[in-house]
Image (cartoon, coloured by chain):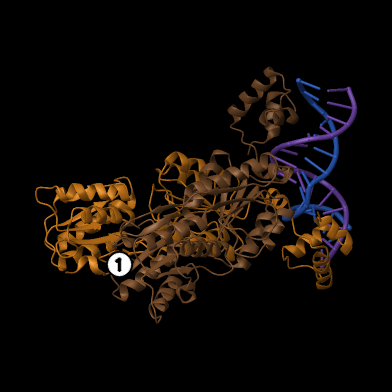
Chain colours: A orange, B brown, C purple, D blue
Amino acid sequence: MVTIYDVASRAGVSTATVSRVLNGASTVDPALASRVRAVVAELGYERNALARNLRLSSTKLWAVIISDIGNPFFTSLVRGVEDVAQEAGHSVVLCNSDEDAAKEAAYIKAALADRMAGVIISPSARAAGINQLVKSATPTVVIDRVVGTAPVDTVLVDNEHGAELATEHLITSGYRRVACVTGPRRLFTAARRLRGYRAALRRGGVDYDETLVRYADFREAGGREAMRSLLTEEHPPDAVFVANNLMTVGALDALVQADVRIPKDFGVVGFDDIPWAHLVRPSLTTVSQPTYDLGRAAARLLLERVRDPHRAPSTVKLKTRLQVRGSSTR
Amino acid sequence: MVTIYDVASRAGVSTATVSRVLNGASTVDPALASRVRAVVAELGYERNALARNLRLSSTKLWAVIISDIGNPFFTSLVRGVEDVAQEAGHSVVLCNSDEDAAKEAAYIKAALADRMAGVIISPSARAAGINQLVKSATPTVVIDRVVGTAPVDTVLVDNEHGAELATEHLITSGYRRVACVTGPRRLFTAARRLRGYRAALRRGGVDYDETLVRYADFREAGGREAMRSLLTEEHPPDAVFVANNLMTVGALDALVQADVRIPKDFGVVGFDDIPWAHLVRPSLTTVSQPTYDLGRAAARLLLERVRDPHRAPSTVKLKTRLQVRGSSTR
DNA sequence: CTGTTAGCGCGTTCAA
DNA sequence: TTGAACGCGCTAACAG
């Protein structure tokens, strides 16, 4: 294995000079620099990342901690992060917490132990993990959710507005009793989307009816259960706003099984796209999120934070868009 | 930051002894060992992974290089890998090559430079990258595809058999002209699935008709194009076997747009599930792959390879299963 | 502008 | 069984 010493001696300079050339230090005699570069090429030298990590006490790794790798929302987001990371010479360590606080804690601990250069996290647990990251001064970007009060860079979508658009759309399409299936109470996104739903009802002059709201688990099975339960209400709904993509799939399934005709007798709008929304019959109206851009934005925020560790934390909020398709217009 | 020296001096032993205790060396006086452990707990010592990496010249990281993070096949697979990795104390670095040989080469180079403990790869390029990995003695498992001839641990599914089952099913369901949309010629899986298709035709006493075969790109757009093109044939098919999940989505879309009635006038079977196969109308018949288990198998193979670097490379082949749903039976 | 040198924190040889 | 001491390869003071 060829080391920096080999290069130095062969080029007739010190290791310090080689290091300076390699790291683009300004003050090196051009003649020396090009000699060093020639030797580097000649010997095929590549610097040992492990030694460098130890010396600098940090790596070129980013941890991306997400809560469900099975959700297309996150895979698209990860792709956005990864594209920016690669341009900047970073690698992405993918960590799937499965909405499990213990797993999440383990990943945060690992990220700290391995001195990762940054963390992008969609927190499933309470604020403890985030606080730990902030305290350790690890560059951190929180994505999709707000947790705790520690000042930290954050990337969100406009959940409330998106939910409001969706619900309003159902009302103006003539549905009379619009239900809502939202996520776990403890989750930021679930609360915000429910709030948007309520705001739309209010603006539409419709009374809020508690029996038309369900808190499920953001997964397919939860959506299915919630929908079934809604259908057994004494005064069942004739439309539903479902607060995430996987639950929408479940809800749709329950409706199909119950032989409910969509959109004639029942309107459906989901939050967040599913890749095959256009294939489902009827095609699915959704509030689409700029998932890939969300990832890119988070990555860029992380880069800026690394560049200037002392800048005030900022929050980027991206817009959602209502994609009207077949399931909500009769 | 608390180092091994702090622990050593506080416990009144040398760093060598602390190191031995930490790494479970056999020959340490139990009394000393427990004293050391007490101090470790007291000081909250955690050993510096970076220094350890340098010393051992390796990390606890696995690189998983896949060719399309947008494909549910790979996300499920990654989850399988990750679950095993975590149990064994490894982290997974996710690398998305996008079927781009240059990107793949860059990731392989990075994995080598960072001395990753192992690589699991679904190769998009020719054999060069794999050879490099094998030559460097990096524990490597190839997944989903066979490339080149270097001896290396491999995990596959029974592509040919699955394709044969699918095609045979269409024939026995009464379709007369079964087409095939397969992947890029250079890809192993595309070739194998096409071979299975041909085998089924042969067994069914049906002549192979070149005009009913298309080579597309394993993506949705490619499947859509291929299907459209098939429909314009002078003697168009009345059924199709599509050799991967995303292309099936595209093909389905093309059929729907052309107002073809499925399954009455046209039968469809896809290779590899899509998560929402049951939601598509009609629900989609597929050859399902044990994607999660594929990931687990690869990870276990990697662990065994690390344990015994000299064992002969082995190939694990997992079974596929025909999931008959609505799109193939009239 | 360049070279010398001292660690980063750990695992491990060698001698006791 | 234990400890002293070295070196993994690199970067960054500091001195020149």
In the rendered image, residue B228, in percent from the top left (x then y), is placed at: 39, 77
User: From the viewer's perspective, is residue B27 above or below residue B301?
Assistant: above
Residue lying at 18% horizontally and 65% vertically, measured from the top left: A263
Residue lying at 26% horizontally and 50% vertically, measured from the top left: A224
* Left or right position of A282 against B225: left
Corner quadrant of residue A306: bottom right
Q: Quadrant of the N terminus of chain A?
A: bottom right
Q: Nearer the viewer, residue A66 or B69?
A: B69
In the rendered image, residue B84, in percent from the top left (x then y), is placed at: 54, 42
In the rendered image, residue A239, in percent from the top left (x then y), is placed at: 17, 59
Q: Identify the element where label 1 is drawn.
A: loop
Q: Residue A316: in sight, yes or no?
A: no
Q: Nearer the viewer, residue A223 or B315?
A: B315
Q: Name the residue under label 1.
A: B262
User: From the viewer's perspective, is residue A184 above or below residue B250?
Assistant: above
Corner quadrant of residue B121: bottom right
Q: What residue type is labelled 1?
A: Ile
Q: Which residue lies furthest to the top in this view?
A: B31
